[in-house]
Image (cartoon, helix red, strand yellow):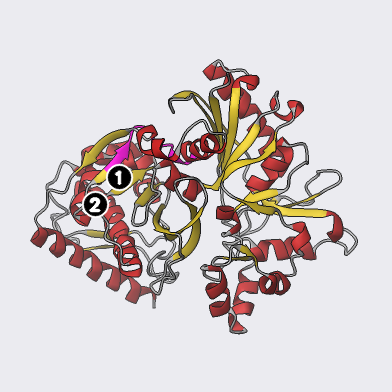
């Protein structure tokens, strides 16, 4: 009997494929990057056909590493870079334009136009999102407006998950899940449907959009030519919601933080949406059975990128991995704070004018103090978002689950626990995005039960807070003053 699950994690710079067995153990891995296109300043594009080609070859590589044949695969799960938008011809299956990536800012003037018309609050009320070119709606509008009217009746529009399902199923399914739909800025968050007002506003015909389905459950079947066997596609989720599920954060109040180039924090809020009054996003997530639920999301723009900047911009590090050892050379920062507002500040401030700064420098400041301050900044920014989540949701944080590259830094994880005054829980497998897609697919075909999620997620280490409350609050208030100083510089 087939007892393997394949998880396809289609990211911004490359595709990762993991193969899991029925015990949730990793058996094989594949990874391949693809081309980033920058046709104009502020524009970022991907070639949909290259993404498909890379995905197929990475699947083959992962299956080979696992010594698993396609016919042995019980289910496939897909997770993807969210918001990235593409358009293709339903009849030929050919893309009509490169995919417009979530980072792309070409539709910023359109967002300003809508803001000037007083529509920002209406869009926020319906979708739970801020009016920003980051989301898919203005990208879809831009793509559709460049078609001849006769073309519009035969196109499909969607996000990366819907493109991959289309290709894997041989064009037999045009679907997306609730989590991806909730990032388009066309989806009514509370009513969980495409919003006719927003479809009219952005000129997106509903018939061009994918059918919205639960994140767990069989939605299509691969063809032999696309995968090598007919296998159910049984799990779909946007990358951050997949990571939340992979961390088994399926109960209200549970929070995960992914430490990557930036940080993405999600708090599961249960069956009802929580509308933030403090700069967080309301988004769809999954309950323990993979069915729709809600989350609050906070995005930190610069996290691991701050360490990269110390390495590449200032030459303080040869490798990012040196940061922990250097930070441990000193007992404190001696009052130095690094506010990494290198591209403005994200949640909960949403201040694009803020500029980065090192605050509190003296003649006694050394490289080690600066490196330590940069790591501590990741923890302080996380507390900014966590405090906001707690205030908005009314739910107390009891433990923070972590993943991503910087989660391997023991100094940072301990300081994070100290600053939050809660334990920080790191899993063995930090690739929780792909793991979440696998969990959803396994649930979707009955390989696993919801009650098994916690056991399938294997714990590596728990960092428990050690810092005295007085010291913690003294340090954090210093951070708040540093942020205030940086924001005043940008005004």
Q: Looking at this rendering, what residue extends furthest in the top direction?
A: 67
Q: Is residue 250 above or below residue 280?
A: above
* Real-space CA distance between mark 1 and mark 2, rounded to the nearest whole angstrom: 9 Å
Q: Residues within 10 Å of mark 1 (few under 14, many from 20)?
A: many
Q: What's drawn in magenta, residue-wise?
A: 425-433
Q: Which residue is painted at 61% across and 57% down in the image?
A: 181
Decide if residue 301 is in sight here: yes
Quarter holding residue 383: bottom left
Q: Which residue is painted at 39% across and 33% down in the image?
A: 456
Nearest to the observer: residue 119 or residue 373: 119
Q: Are marks 1 and 2 in contact (CB under 8 Å)?
A: yes
Quarter holding residue 342: bottom left
**Place of residue 262 in the rendered image (x, y in percent of width and height, measured from the top left):** 42, 52
Q: Is residue 340 above or below residue 24?
A: below
Q: Quadrant of the N terminus?
A: top right
Decide if residue 106 is in sight here: no
Q: Quadrant of the C terminus?
A: bottom left
Any magenta on residue 430?
yes
Q: Secondary structure at mark 2?
A: helix
Q: Which residue is painted at 33% across and 41% down in the image?
A: 407
- Where does label 2 land, which residue? 370
Quarter holding residue 301: bottom left
Any magenta on residue 175?
no
In the picture, measured across the screen, residue 1 lies left or right of residue 478, that is right
Which mark is drawn over residue 316?
1
């Amino acid at each position: 009997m087939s007892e393997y699950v394949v998880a396809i994690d289609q990211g911004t710079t490359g595709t990762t494929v993991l193969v899991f067995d029925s015990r949730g153990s990793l058996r094989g891995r594949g990874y391949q990057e693809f081309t980033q296109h920058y046709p104009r300043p502020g524009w970022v594009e991907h070639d949909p056909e290259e993404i498909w080609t890379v995905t197929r070859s990475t699947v083959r590589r992962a299956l080979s590493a696992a010594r698993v044949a396609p016919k042995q695969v019980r289910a496939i799960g897909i997770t993807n870079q969210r918001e990235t938008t593409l358009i293709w011809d339903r009849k030929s299956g050919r893309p009509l334009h490169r995919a417009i990536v979530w980072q792309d800012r070409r539709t910023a003037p359109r967002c300003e136009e809508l803001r000037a018309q007083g529509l920002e609050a209406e869009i926020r009320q319906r979708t739970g999102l801020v009016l920003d070119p980051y989301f898919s709606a203005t990208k879809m509008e831009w793509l559709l407006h460049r078609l001849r009217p006769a073309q519009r009746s035969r196109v499909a529009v969607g996000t990366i998950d819907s493109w991959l399902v289309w290709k894997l199923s041989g064009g037999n399914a045009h679907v997306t899940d609730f989590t991806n739909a909730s990032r388009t800025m066309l989806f009514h968050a509370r009513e969980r449907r495409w919003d006719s007002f927003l479809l009219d506003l952005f000129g997106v015909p509903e018939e061009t959009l994918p059918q919205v389905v639960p994140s767990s459950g069989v939605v299509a079947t691969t063809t032999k030519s696309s995968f090598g066997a007919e296998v159910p596609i049984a799990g779909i989720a946007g990358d951050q919601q997949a990571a939340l599920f992979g961390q088994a954060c399926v109960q209200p109040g549970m929070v995960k933080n992914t430490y990557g180039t930036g940080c993405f924090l999600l708090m599961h809020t249960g069956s009802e949406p929580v509308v933030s009054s403090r700069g967080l996003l309301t988004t769809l997530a999954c309950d323990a059975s993979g069915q729709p639920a809600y989350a609050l999301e906070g995005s930190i723009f610069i996290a691991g990128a701050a360490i990269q900047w110390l390495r590449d911009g200032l030459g303080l590090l040869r490798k990012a991995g040196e940061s922990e050892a250097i930070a441990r050379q000193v007992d404190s920062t001696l009052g130095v704070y690094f506010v990494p507002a290198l591209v403005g500040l994200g949640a909960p401030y949403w201040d694009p004018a803020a500029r980065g700064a090192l605050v509190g420098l003296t003649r006694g400041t050394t490289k080690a103090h600066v490196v330590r301050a940069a790591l501590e900044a990741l923890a302080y920014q996380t507390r900014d978002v966590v405090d906001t989540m707690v205030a908005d949701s009314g739910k107390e944080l009891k433990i923070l689950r972590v993943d991503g590259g910087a989660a391997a830094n023991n100094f940072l994880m301990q300081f994070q626990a100290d600053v939050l005054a809660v334990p920080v829980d790191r899993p063995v497998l930090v690739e929780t995005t792909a793991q979440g897609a696998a969990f959803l697919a396994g649930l979707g075909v009955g390989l696993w039960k919801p009650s098994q999620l916690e056991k399938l997620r294997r714990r590596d280490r728990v960092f428990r807070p050690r810092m005295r409350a007085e010291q913690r609050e003294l340090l954090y208030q210093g951070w708040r003053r540093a942020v205030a100083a940086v924001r005043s510089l940008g005004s």
